[in-house]
Amino acid sequence: QEIRQDWQWLFENVSPTLHSFDTEEEITEFVCCKINSIIATEQENLTEDEDTYKNVDYDFHQRFSMPKDEKLVC
């Protein structure tokens, strides 16, 4: 299901611009660049979420004087 959603997004958001390219190589380069950009954006979001979790985890342990080996479960 997720793969189909991704293909649908590519079809709707990338396909309309492909006619403006002259060669298949240009199309491939454009699509790869677009996908890499999306991946980089998602990785930034994951990093932000991870940093937020680390801050919350640190604050939790400080506030409640919890031992460091005690795990915070989201």
Image (tube, rainbow, N blue to C red):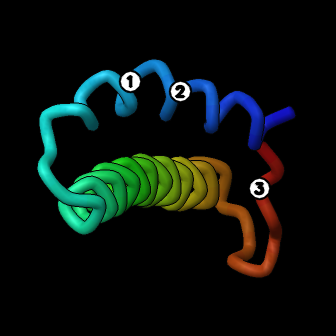
| Residue at the disc numbered 3 | 72
Q: Which mark is residue 9?
A: 2
How many neighbours does mark 1 have within 10 angstroms: few (below 14), some (14-19), or many (20 or more)?
Answer: few
Looking at the rendered structure, the kind of residue marked 2 is Trp
How many neighbours does mark 3 have within 10 angstroms: few (below 14), some (14-19), or many (20 or more)?
Answer: some
Q: Position of residue 21 (x, y in %)?
A: 15, 45
Q: Is residue 59 visible?
A: no
The N terminus: image quadrant: top right
Query: How many labels were placed on the picture?
Result: 3
Badge 2 marks a residue whose secondary structure is helix
Using the numbered discs, state the Cα–Cα distance from disc 2 to disc 1 in whole angstroms.
6 Å
Q: State which quadrant residue 36 falls in.
A: bottom left
Q: Are marks 2 and 3 in contact (CB under 8 Å)?
A: no
First of labels 2, 3 by sequence position: 2
Nearer mark to the viewer, of 1 and 3: 1
**Horizontal relation, residue 4 to residue 62: left or right:** right
Q: Position of residue 22 (x, y in %)?
A: 13, 50
Q: Position of residue 9 (x, y in %)?
A: 53, 26
- In the picture shown, does residue 2 fall above or below 50? above
Q: Are marks 2 and 1 in contact (CB under 8 Å)?
A: yes
**Horizontal relation, residue 9 to residue 69: left or right:** left
Query: Which of 1/52 is in front?
Result: 1
Query: Which of 46/35 is in front?
Result: 35
Q: Residue at x 51, y 58 (%)?
A: 50
Using the numbered discs, state the Cα–Cα distance from disc 1 to disc 3 in whole angstroms.
40 Å
| Residue at the disc numbered 1 | 13
Q: Position of residue 19 (x, y in %)?
A: 23, 32
Residue furthest to the front in view is: 22
Residue furthest to the bottom in view is: 69
Q: Are marks 1 and 3 in contact (CB under 8 Å)?
A: no
The C terminus: image quadrant: top right
Q: Is residue 25 visible?
A: yes
